[in-house]
Amino acid sequence: MTKSHLFLQKKITIGNLIVLITFLSVIIPSYSLEAAVRKANPFTLYTLEGKEIPFESPTRFSLLYFLSPHCFPCLNDLSLFSLETIPENIDIYPICAGCTWRETIKVENSVSGNLTVYLAPADLKPLWGIWEFPTAFLVDPNMKVIRKWEGEIDLSEVNKLVDSLSRERGRRSGSPNSSSDSCNGNLCY
């Protein structure tokens, strides 16, 4: 065998491996938080005044909205959130994970309205699987992650989801066989 023949054989083998990896990545489904319920671990948020806010047992549905001060869609969403009427059964937590105090104050000052932007340690991003901004999680009062959004978020979609989950909880609470862990399609509650 000549050197050129061995080189060609190597190129073909590498090409076949690339095709196989691409094929397997398409065939094997990826897991997302929309399809699987998981318990949210408690963590601590901080206000700009330095007050610790433990997130461990919410009384209502909570939208954890992770943002970056350099993310225009994040700032746009926050402006829209401050202009819209937020339903009484949802708490919104804009969280700047890994941001400095100065970055967070700029974000909070850029949003006119009644939203408080919280600081969180940078290690919260990998723990929650945040690889892009904005990323939001809907957490129910039992500390279960219901849904994950990446990219711009439509608050009316969140409201509809919370309303349907609240109605379903109301129906289940009256039945003797109600379970706290049930899923219907991609929605878990």
Image: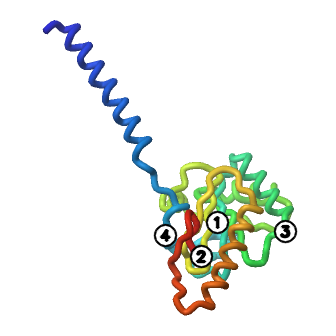
- Tag 1 and tag 2, C-beta contact below 8 Å: yes
Judge the density around disc 1: few (<14), some (14-19), many (≥20) Cα neighbours within 10 Å: some
Gap in angstroms between the C-alphas marked 4 and 1: 15 Å
Gap in angstroms between the C-alphas marked 3 and 1: 17 Å
Disc 1 on helix, strand or loop?
strand
Q: Position of residue 22 (x, y in %)?
A: 40, 35
List the residue tagged with mark 2. 55
Up/down of 178 relative to 134, above or below: below
Query: Which circle marks residue 38 in the picture?
Result: 4
Gap in angstroms between the C-alphas marked 1 and 2: 10 Å
For image coordinates 61% across by 88% down, the residue present is 173
Q: Which amino acid does label 3 sit on?
A: Thr
- Tag 2 and tag 4, C-beta contact below 8 Å: no
Disc 4 on helix, strand or loop?
strand
Of 100 and 71, the residue lying toward us: 71
Looking at the image, is mark 4 or mark 1 earlier in the sequence?
Answer: 4
List the residue tagged with mark 3. 85
